[in-house]
């Protein structure tokens, strides 16, 4: 890639290789980006990885990433998972860059997992010169210093979270982490370094990250697609002022996502016809998403997480009710329908996009009426684990923030995992092949959601599967409240669990509409009811 020198510049216009040569050993680097390539400065990351392979410099780095970058394989931060290059990693989500997580699991580097919202808000604290943030987020979970304090292995000994009591109430204090380098991405930079994001899907932490680094005397490197003349960008479109930027890397072929190109529906320039959205086939995932949709009422503000829950928006469109409530994603999108899998958060038909820290402010303050999240493990006390299981470090992402103050919490997942095959037909469920792993266990490996705390706070909590629905009882413990037609309660439910739940006195059959191919008629039902 040739160095760009066409326009007179008041900021360094560098190649990726030149930019990463600015990074010394022993510093903390904050990375912008989310899964599937969303706002990921890939060219700079790859150049940094290559520099270390070639020169063994820079060494002993600390990585700071609020969201999970990557494709759950070899992209994102996985290229930076090199021995000697990284000393410590502090992340909100780990599964997208598994090479880094494997180093932590092997006790080769220090590793911390903090809630995504906390990490986002800590950047603002670092920018403002504050010592940290005081929050309820993480109490009663593995983030709590009374459990592991977010430390991921034996090698990690420094405590970065403190338990504090104020006016008789427990709080967690997360101390500020000041990055020395920020590697960010936008769409257009002018020759003064002012950055816009018109082709990006979301803003994430771009501004507080740059502010935190600059106020800490550090270096901000911005990857962009194109360069413009100074003072020609619309001021309201500028997301990062040029005085925060030290170097601009121009990558003309910069894709919006890993799949390449720019999708104008995802960047918000156009609205997609709802008829163009693919309706999923009737399978176990659709059954679960349909049942979860029953828990929404018109006017609700909700959050939808990655996994089975991310299909709720599509189901709502199929039912013609998607405009009657608002779903949000923690990375900043409001409204619309999110993509699934590694591209979760890349949404179409958004009503608005805000910065990530502000989205979490709303969540932490109790703004959510309902949230829809997945589970990996559930135990008899209603505890949920999504962060670490089967020896694999996944991380909490926004899960702990989202569940901490949401008024209603819906967990979704299949009853078993590992090869589960079901047949959904004639209004019932048949288990063709049972999964190898039980997901309802006597005790979860790690507490990402605390059932006892939820009971104390009077939360309504449901656990939805393809064959049964459970509730968290007001007095504690899990209760079976619904069972699917065609399911044998002893063989297909109790025998597939690590404990025997309470059974509701008014045990019901799950709505037969869930298991039929045609739309369920929710819109007409809502019109009559509301």
Image (cartoon, rainbow, N blue to C red):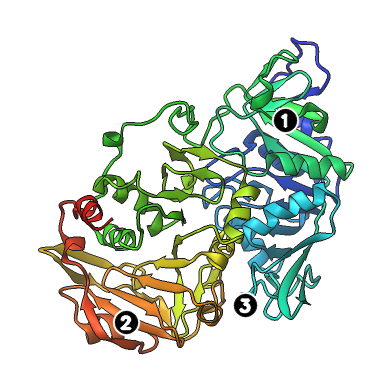
From this view, report whether residue 361 is shown above or below residue 207: below
Query: Residue at 71% of width from left, 73% of height from top?
Result: 149
Residue found at the far right of this picture: 217
Mark 3 Cα shell of 10 Å, populated few (<14), some (14-19), many (≥20): some
State which mark lies toward you, 2 or 1: 2
Q: Which one is earlier in the sequence, the residue at label 2 or at label 3? A: 3
Question: Could you say whether the residue bearing mark 3 is in a helix, strand or loop?
Answer: loop
| Above or below for 399 versus 72 | below
Label number found at residue 16: 1
Q: Earlier in the sequence, mark 2 or mark 1?
A: 1
The residue beneath circle 2 is 480
Q: How many marks?
A: 3
User: Which residue was labeled with disc 3?
Assistant: 140
Q: Nearer the viewer, residue 435 or 429?
A: 429
CA gap, disc 2 and disc 1: 56 Å
The C terminus sits in image quarter = bottom left
Residue 82 visible from this viewpoint: no
């Amino acid at each position: 890639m040739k160095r760009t020198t066409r326009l007179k510049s008041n900021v360094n216009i560098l190649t990726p290789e030149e930019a990463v040569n600015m990074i010394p050993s022993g510093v903390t680097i904050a990375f912008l980006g989310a899964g599937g390539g969303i706002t990921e400065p890939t060219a700079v990351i790859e150049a940094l990885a290559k520099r270390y392979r070639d020169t063994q410099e820079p060494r002993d780095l600390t990585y700071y990433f609020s969201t999970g970058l990557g494709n759950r394989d070899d992209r994102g931060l996985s290229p930076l998972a090199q021995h000697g290059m990284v000393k410590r990693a502090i992340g909100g989500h780990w599964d997208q860059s598994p090479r880094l997580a494997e180093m932590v699991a092997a006790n080769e580097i220090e590793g911390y997992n903090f809630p995504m919202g906390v990490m986002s808000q800590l950047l603002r604290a670092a920018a403002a010169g504050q010592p940290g943030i005081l929050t309820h987020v993480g109490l009663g979970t593995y983030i709590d210093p009374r459990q592991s304090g977010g430390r991921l292995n034996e090698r990690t000994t420094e405590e970065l979270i403190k338990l504090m009591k104020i006016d008789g109430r427990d709080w967690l204090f997360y101390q500020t982490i000041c990055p020395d380098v920020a590697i960010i991405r936008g769409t257009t930079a002018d020759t003064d370094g002012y950055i816009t994001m018109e082709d990006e899907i979301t803003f994430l932490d771009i501004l507080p990250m740059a502010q935190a680094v600059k106020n800490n005397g550090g270096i901000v490197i911005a990857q962009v697609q194109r360069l413009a003349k100074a003072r020609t960008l619309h001021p309201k479109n500028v997301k990062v002022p040029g005085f925060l930027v030290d170097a601009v890397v121009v990558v003309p072929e910069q894709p919006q996502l890993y799949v390449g190109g720019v999708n104008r529906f995802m960047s918000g320039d156009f609205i997609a016809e709802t008829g163009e959205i693919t309706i999923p086939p009737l399978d176990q995932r659709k059954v679960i998403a349909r049942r979860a949709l029953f828990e929404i009422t018109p006017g609700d503000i909700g959050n939808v997480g990655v996994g089975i829950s991310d299909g709720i928006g599509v189901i709502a469109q199929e039912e013609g009710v998607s405009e009657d409530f608002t779903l949000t994603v923690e990375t900043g999108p409001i409204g619309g329908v999110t993509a699934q899998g590694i591209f979760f958060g890349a949404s179409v038909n958004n009503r608005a996009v805000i910065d990530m820290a502000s989205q979490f402010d709303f969540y932490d303050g109790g703004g959510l009426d309902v949230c829809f999240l997945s589970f990996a493990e559930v135990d008899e006390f209603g505890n949920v684990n999504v962060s670490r299981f089967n020896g694999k470090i996944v991380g909490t992402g926004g899960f702990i923030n989202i569940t901490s103050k949401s008024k209603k919490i819906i967990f979704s997942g299949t009853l078993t995992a590992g090869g589960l095959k079901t047949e959904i037909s004639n209004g019932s469920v048949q288990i063709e092949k049972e999964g190898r792993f039980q997901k309802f266990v006597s005790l979860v490996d790690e507490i990402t959601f605390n059932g006892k705390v939820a009971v104390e706070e009077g939360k309504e909590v449901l656990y939805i599967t393809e064959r049964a629905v459970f509730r968290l009882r007001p007095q504690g413990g899990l209760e079976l409240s619904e069972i699917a037609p065609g399911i044998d309660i002893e063989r297909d439910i109790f025998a597939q669990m690590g404990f025997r739940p309470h059974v509701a006195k008014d045990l019901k059959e799950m709505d037969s509409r869930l298991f039929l191919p045609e739309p369920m008629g929710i819109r007409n039902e809502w019109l009559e009811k509301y």
